[in-house]
């Protein structure tokens, strides 16, 4: 991307590729520059900590961490930076991501991590957009337009459903 990244996407493993792409696609829709790295809390802990320590100095404003199983990555990043960190629990193992969800949501007091639903990269990106929109009027306008489009889809769906009900049951 040509502009200086504002969001850092950190995947715990290359197997989290699809969630990374979902996050990247959503950020791109909002014209929000990002960077993506793979850094494991367990296999490359020094890389993960250093990435978080240097993130703010590089101009990043929010970090999004994707991790499965024990899902320590979001916490490792949050412990090494004061930037907001959003955790995305990945589906893996026998618990289907529930273990990752609980690990991310249950951070110790003092080191918070935002947490979205299991495998919900889109919501993680949208939360990053919302955080940054608080300080960027153009981004706030794009987010408002996006939410108005969601509202219009719901209204259109209701209209279609009611028409179908009237046709079939009256």
Image (tube, rainbow, N blue to C red):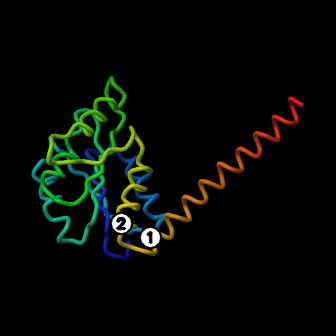
- In this view, the residue in front, 24 or 84, is 84
Q: Are marks 2 and 1 in contact (CB under 8 Å)?
A: yes
Secondary structure found at label 2: helix
Secondary structure found at label 1: helix
Residue neighbourhood size for the residue with mark 1, other residues' Cα within 10 Å, grouped as few (<14), some (14–19), many (≥20):
some
Percent of width and height locating residue 165:
81, 34
Q: Is residue 44 left or right of residue 27?
A: left
Residue at 71% over, 44% down = 158
161 to 93, vertically: above or below:
below
30 to 63, vertically: above or below:
below
Percent of width and height locating residue 41:
17, 44
Residue at 37% over, 28% down = 96
Residue labelled with disc 2? 132
- In this view, the residue in front, 17 or 53, is 53
Q: Is residue 84 left or right of residue 29?
A: left
Q: Which mark is residue 59?
A: none
Residue labelled with disc 1? 139
Q: How many numbered marks appear?
A: 2
Residue at 55% over, 61% down = 146
Mark pair 2, 1: CA separation: 7 Å
Q: In the picture, which quadrant includes the N terminus?
A: bottom left
């Amino acid at each position: 991307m040509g502009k200086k990244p504002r969001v850092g996407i950190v995947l715990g493993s290359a197997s989290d590729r699809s969630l990374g792409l979902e996050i990247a696609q959503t950020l791109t829709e909002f014209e929000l520059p990002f960077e993506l790295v793979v850094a494991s809390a367990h296999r490359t802990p020094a890389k993960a900590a250093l990435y978080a320590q240097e993130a703010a100095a590089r101009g990043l404003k929010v970090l999004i961490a994707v991790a499965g199983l024990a899902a320590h990555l979001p916490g490792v990043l949050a412990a090494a930076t004061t930037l907001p960190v959003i955790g995305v629990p990945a589906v893996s193992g026998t618990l289907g991501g529930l273990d990752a969800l609980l690990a991310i949501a249950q951070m110790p007091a003092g080191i918070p991590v935002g947490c979205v639903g299991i495998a919900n990269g889109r919501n993680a990106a949208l939360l990053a957009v919302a955080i940054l929109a608080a300080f960027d009027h153009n981004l706030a306008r794009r987010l408002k337009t996006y939410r108005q489009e969601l509202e219009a889809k719901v209204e259109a769906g209701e209209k279609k459903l009611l028409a179908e009900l009237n046709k079939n049951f009256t």
